[in-house]
Amino acid sequence: MQKERTYDEVTLITVDATMSAAIHGGRAKCLQRLVRLDMPVPRTVALSFGAVRRIAAGELPDLDTILRPFGPDPLVSVRPSSQDPDWGGPGAILNIGMCDSRHADMCATMGEAAATSLYLRFIQSYATEVARLEADSFELPDHPDRAALARALAAFEDEMDEPFPQDPARQLADVLKSMARAWEGTSARLLREAKGAPADAGLGLVVQAMALGVGQGECGSGVIQFIDAATGQRRITGRYLSQSQGRDALTAESGALYLTKDPRGPSLEEAHPDTFAKLVAFGDRSRERLREEMEIEFTVEDGRLKILDAVRVPRSNRAAVRIAVDLAADGVIPPEEAVMRIEPQALSELLHRQIDPGAPRDVITRGIAASPGAASGRIVFTATDAQAAAARGESCVLVRRETSPEDIRGMHAAAAVLTIRGGVTSHAAVIGRGLGLPCVVGASTLRIDRKRGCLIAPDGRRFAEGETLTVDGTTGDVIAGEPPMVEAALDGAFRQLLDWADGFRDIGVRANADTPADAQTARNFAAEGIGLCRTEHMFFEGERLSLMREMIFADAPDDRTAVLARLLPMQRGDFIELFKIMAGHPVCIRLFDPPLHEFLPSDKAGLRDLADILNLPLADVTARVEAMEEYNPMLGMRGVRLGVTVPEIYEMQARAIFEATIAASRKGAPVVPEIMIPLVSAMREVELVKNRIDAVAVNVHNETGAEFDYRLGVMVETPRAALRAGDIALHAAFLSFGTNDLTQMTYGLSRDDAGRFMSAYVSQGVYEEDPFHTLDLEGVGELLTIGAQRARSSCPEIMLSICGEHGGSRSAIAFSRARGLNYVSCSPFRVPVARLSAAQIALTDRNQLPGLAADRP
Ligand code: PEP
Ligand code: MG
């Protein structure tokens, strides 16, 4: 049996000390690694999480044990060491041990100015960080002389009613207590929890011998890193400042040296080439052995280099991808580790323009972040104005209460979309994600004043039509004006990482794509096909909309067929283009789904136009439109219900698909279209539609003599379809779970209206998350499980997939994979995120992770 390791609360860091990041924190463990790499690290003692917890509770460890390694006159620093360095911690305190007698000794050895400067620095940190006195009285003087020192000591005594502590052990005890308690404070706790730390995250502390950056000979301090933190490119950056401590060099107004030769000024490389060369060698060694890009803090003490600390370089998401790929390409880490190191969501930031993270933001309100990326433009309130702005070459932000299918052309023309109502699966959100268009929905604190043509912010500010607004669909921020942006970064590193990811994943990833532009985006992101083409979006284009309306108003089937015959070539053209772009990859075309009423105008002007086109009295048109209204259209005459009652529409679509198949297969890779029936709830619906579609296929074959194949499938998006999946599967080559409608119907929750109360529901814990955003594994998930099991037990070979908005999320991918689904389908811009998530899920499951995370600095 393996012996359990025991850890001391106070550990001198040596090559073979028993230490762990989970006990002593990341910084302490990293310092041990640097020691093992033979770097000149000053003597350091680590205090474990347990020790620090006890200190916060008032129980000090034996100070003698801590201070003994530092000799009779200790001079030390204390730094925090949390398990993950990103979780932060209290600031470092340097020069502990400075007191009157030490000052006198140091005046003799290093000169009065240097010794007094160190003492003053310590008094300042102790007074403000430990005794929590006002900073104003302890500002560092321009001339650190004896008079300034006397003033600082007197100010301390004045405030505290006791002289400045002279005993190094007492000083250290006070510093340790103050840092331990700061970690337990509520604001520190909230801050680290926001960065992902668990509620009981521990803090370790490291006590290190001071390597003084001030004194005789060449003394100073600096920070070096070997990559550009914004791009991840290999490039030495940092600064060095003579006669300084800590990170002074980075903030110095003057006097700091560049590290490499630099046209802007003198450099360490020129002034102290040996020191520079050693630093570069340490950088190479730490990259190779710590398997990370590190930022190294160093000191030069009378010409001798000391390495005080090293942390993972803080980096942008774009840099993180490049660093991981470069480390793997250089053989420092295996590709699977590079794939595991990148947070999939971080990729979505790379796919879109973003607001420069350093830029100030005048945020006027925050809504739901519905489609990532940011864009600025002039405010327009109608789709027509958006198109007019685009025609003038102007960038615009389309602001609507909510969008409807009629707004599609305006959305295409806009740089971003902002809606007052709606949630993550509302129309604006779905289309925005499909187009890669930044989109914020449900910004319910904004008001549109149509009469005055302005938008009113919650603080009362008015933004008139034509004024510039920025929409940040990554954060949900709505911002006044136009902050600077950074461009998308689909570089070689990005592609390489995803190529590796594809080699590890074992579930397919397709895209939801309705237009040739969507399809092209999907292919650019290496989607393996189209999992959902919502054909209704094809009918909102200019002439087609009029034809649709004529078709809806047709009194007899023959009239309807005549109008549909005019739509047929247009549909055929749409499909030929999609097939061409997808070049033999599967394309799943969903037959017409929405209620017909969505195609009819809702305002007076639109009704009048329609009366003109149809040559009918306005009263007749109005009465017909009103008669078609439904109380609950999403549960009304839509999807397969139209297919059964107005079969001509599906017949036209099937013919267009088959004719396009023949045409596209003649010129390119053979196409086997997948045809999907929406909103099914009963097997008989499938039988009826299937019979008609099969008949169309026979007719097309007889007319053309061409051979072609096709697959007919069913969208499972009603609870009944999931429960009856066993029967339904008997008539289907595939089933695809539409989790948007399935969520809507399982909860009895309108996907277009839930935004009104969703935040109250989530904040009060009724729902853990918005179920339209995060797949509800318990309820909707159970229906998926039942559906998949029943379908597979009656047809083991049936292809199963998921195509709702959840399709790209990690939890939905893991769930789908665990239930044996063949692929997920998501918005084109989520395809890269889904590919990476799927790879990480497979790798984690296969447990093929040689030495991951655990030994990362
Ligand atoms: C669904 O319901 O999950 C779906 C993909 O279809 P739509 O969003 O078009 O209703
Ligand atoms: Mg649906």
Image: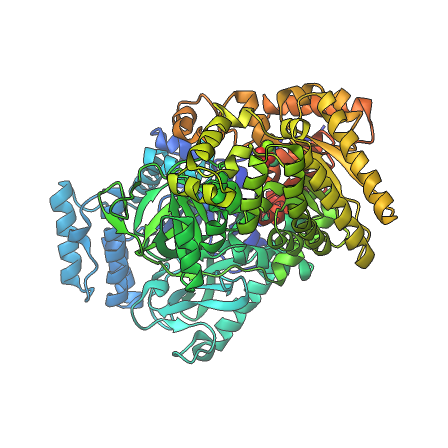
The quarter of the picture where residue 492 lies is bottom right
Image quadrant containing the N terminus: top right
Residue 234 visible within the image: yes
Q: Is residue 12 left or right of residue 490?
A: left
Q: Estimate the x, y position of residue 135 in percent, counting from the top left.
A: 20, 50
Query: Which one is nearer the viewer's eye here, 120 or 282?
Result: 282
Residue 19 visible within the image: no
Q: Image height check: is 264 above or below 30?
A: below
Please name the residue shown 60% across and 24% down the image: 780
Q: Image height check: is 116 above or below 729?
A: below
Ligand 2 shown in quarter: top right
Query: Which one is nearer the viewer's eye here, 128 or 173?
Result: 128
Q: Is residue 658 left or right of residue 617?
A: right
Q: Estimate the x, y position of residue 674 in percent, counting from the top left.
A: 75, 40
Q: Estimate the x, y position of residue 793 in percent, counting from the top left.
A: 80, 22
Q: Estimate the x, y position of residue 552 in percent, counting from the top left.
A: 57, 36
Q: Image height check: is 765 above or below 392?
A: above
Please name the residue shown 36% across and 65% down the image: 249
Please name the residue shown 27% across and 50% down the image: 463
Query: Which one is nearer the viewer's eye here, 274 or 573?
Result: 573
- The colour scheme applied to this rendered structure is rainbow
Q: Image height check: is 280 above or below 849?
A: below
The quarter of the picture where residue 108 lies is bottom left
